[in-house]
Amino acid sequence: MQTPPYHAQWHAHSMPEHQINYGATYPVQLVDGSTLVLPLRPLPDGEKAIALLMSNQTGFAVERALVRLLTDMVRELKPEVIVGVPTMGLAYAGQVAENLGFDDYVALGHSRKFWYDDALSQCLTSSTSPDQAKHLYLDPALVERVRGRRVVVMDDVLNTGRTAAATIRLMQKVQAQVAGITAVLTEGWAWRTELEHIGPDMPGLVHALGHIPMFGHTDGGWRPLAGT
């Protein structure tokens, strides 16, 4: 599979987006006016598709450009610590933390190490792996990096919001202050409802470089679903 290219210019369409048919790719407008072209991947039912960002499959030029934009976005939130969400959020969190001049960052994990404490975990499921129940863990050795500090959570794509919600709850267990939930992209709007279960102000903590809708199948390809 070819790495989706990163373009420097955005070309606007003359009709509403939900009336446009797309073929194999979808161009996402980012905050700086550039575009990130993503492959469209049908879901198992064949009736819907997603624009897929695989952070470990993009080229280095794409990665550098996204990290630069993320760094600028996160800097405005004035964090003391960056917390990376597995798996794909870790591709950006460490680099952004280094760009901000931090000595380290906090990487959450899905794999339970023998010294972990189950009290420092949250159960969740992923939208891309819905049949696999997972746990989100904070290494006990890293608790003091976040306790009582202003943290920014970093993921690649915010979709259902379940991972972001689990991360917030995990940070609350160690009295960390979540100053922002950041991602390369938001996808659909289900994450808003999930975060509202924690608090009505939580969706307002979300910051992303761009937004992607869900897609429905048409005779001409894939069309963004209205309301997503």
Image (spheres, grey):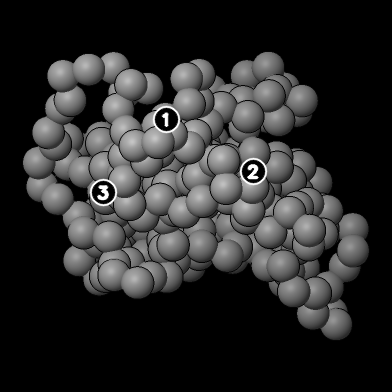
| C-alpha separation, residue under disc 3 versus residue under disc 2 | 23 Å
Q: Would residue 106 be visible to someone looking at this image?
A: no
The tag on residue 206 is: none
Left or right: 214 in relation to 199: left
Give the secondary structure at mark 2. helix
Q: Say which of marks 2 and 1 sits in front.
A: 1
Kind of residue at badge 2: Ala
Q: Amino acid at mark 1?
A: Pro
Residue 203: % across, % down: 58, 25
Q: Nearer the viewer, residue 152 or 158?
A: 158
Rendered image quadrant of residue 9: top left
Which label is found at residue 36?
3
Alpha carbon separation for disc pair 2 and 1 = 24 Å
Q: Earlier in the sequence, mark 3 or mark 2?
A: 3
* In the foreground, 6 or 226: 226
- Name the residue at the right extreme: 118
| 228 lies above or below 155 | above
Q: Which residue is mark 2?
A: 164
**Of 199 and 36, which appears nearest the observer?**
36
**Quick check: marks 1 and 3 in contact, CB under 8 Å?**
no
In terms of sequence position, does the residue under pointer 2 or pointer 1 come before the other? 2
- Viewer-closest of 18 and 134: 18
Q: Residue at x 31, y 46 (%)?
A: 23
Residue 3 x/y as whole percent:
29, 67
Q: Disc 1 versus disc 3: distance between alpha carbons?
A: 16 Å
> What residue sits 64% from the left and 43% below the top?
164
Q: Give x and y (percent) for residue 216.
A: 49, 34
Question: Vertical placement of 45 versus 134: above or below?
Answer: above
Image quarter of residue 207: top left
